[in-house]
Image (tube, grey):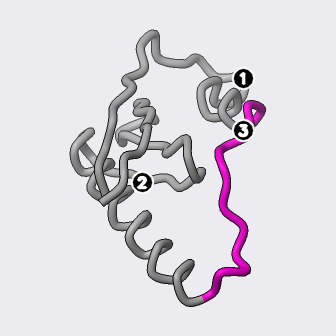
Amino acid sequence: MNFYTVILRKSADYWVSLCLENGLVGQGETQEKAIDKLKEAIESFGEIYRDQANIYTGSIPIDELHEFLTVGDSETPETYELRKVYA
């Protein structure tokens, strides 16, 4: 099990979780469901990565993080949540 850094934000009626270490995302009706979906994505990616090591993996670039946080030109929530997740 590895440690990951996750940012959560509200998007319309859903919560979106973004993993800073690999750029994977999860979405759910609650924060916990969004994190659970992200954990599933991390586990699936890990299985594929073990079999096909030529797949690129890396931290999310700062411009992509900025895009995630600003959500285009629309209003953004005043708060974001940063969590540590083990998957």
Q: Residue at x 72, y 38 (%)?
A: 64
| Quadrant for the N terminus in the image | bottom left
The magenta-colored residue range is 52-63
Question: SS for tag 2?
Answer: strand
Quadrant of residue 42 in the image? bottom left
**Residue matched to label 1:** 73
**Image position of 24 with respect to 20: above or below:** below
Q: Residue at x 43, y 30 (%)?
A: 9
**Residue matched to label 2:** 26
Give the amino acid type for the residue marked by disc 1 in the picture: Asp
Within 10 angstroms of label 3, few (less than 14), some, or many (20 or more) residues? few
> In terms of sequence position, does the residue under pointer 3 or pointer 1 come before the other?
3
Distance from the alpha carbon under mark 3 to that under mark 1: 15 Å
Give the amino acid type for the residue marked by disc 3 in the picture: Glu
Residue 83: x percent and y percent?
Answer: 34, 31
Quadrant of residue 75 in the image? top right
User: In the image shown, does 84 or 73 lie closer to the viewer?
Assistant: 84
Dots 2, 3 in contact, CB < 8 A: no
| Res 55 label | none
User: In the image shown, does 62 or 69 lie closer to the viewer?
Assistant: 62
Distance from the alpha carbon under mark 2 to that under mark 3: 16 Å
Quadrant of residue 80 in the image? top left
Dots 2, 1 in contact, CB < 8 A: no
Per the picture, the main secondary structure of the magenta-coloured stretch is loop
Within 10 angstroms of label 1, few (less than 14), some, or many (20 or more) residues? few
Q: Residue at x 50, y 72 (%)?
A: 45
